[in-house]
Amino acid sequence: AAAPAEMNVSGYGDLIATWTAPVDWYLGNVLGMGQHFHTAPSDMIRTQCDRLLENSEKLAAGDAKTLGELANVLTLSGLSMG
C-alpha cells in the first residue's frame, strides 16, 4: 500500500492485459506461430481479475486489502505464464 500510485496503476494495466493475452496466444496457435493453446493459465486468474476490475475505485484510493489482492493476482499471472 506504500508503493507510489504510478506503480499501482502499472499493476492494474498488467491486470487488464490478462484479458487480451489469451486471445493473442490462441490466434498465434491457430496460425501455427506459437505453442499449443490451453485455457488453464487464464482460467486460474480470471475470477480474481473480475473482482479487481469491479473494485478499481478502491485501487485508485490505495485500499490496502485491494492492493494486496492485486499483488496476489499479478503473482498468479506470472506463475501461470510459466
Image (cartoon, rainbow, N blue to C red):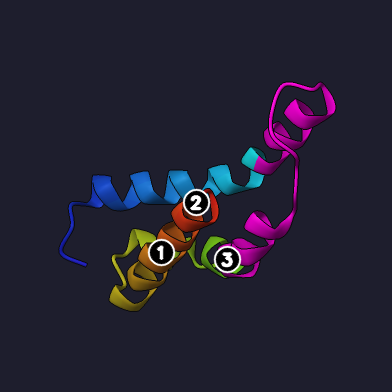
Determine which residue is flagged by label 2: 15
Magenta stretch: dominant secondary structure: helix
Quadrant for the N terminus, please.
bottom left
The reply to whether the C-beta atoms of the residues labelled 3 and 2 are less than 8 Å apart is no
Magenta stretch: includes residue 59: no
Q: Which residue: 54% across, 56% down?
A: 80
Asked if residue 19 lies left or right of residue 75, the reply is: right
Q: Residue 71 in the image: state x and y as whole percent.
A: 36, 64
Asked if residue 64 lies left or right of residue 31, the reply is: left
- The Cα–Cα distance between marks 3 and 2, rounded to whole angstroms, is 12 Å
The reply to whether the C-beta atoms of the residues labelled 1 and 2 are less than 8 Å apart is yes
- The Cα–Cα distance between marks 1 and 2, rounded to whole angstroms, is 8 Å
The residue under label 2 is which amino acid type?
Leu
Q: Which residue: 75% across, 50% down?
A: 38
Dot label at residue 70: 1
- Which residues make up the magenta segment? 22-49
Determine which residue is flagged by label 3: 54
Asked if residue 64 lies left or right of residue 28, the reply is: left
Q: Which residue: 37% across, 50% down?
A: 11
In this view, the residue in front, 50 or 35, is 35
Q: Earlier in the sequence, mark 1 or mark 3?
A: 3
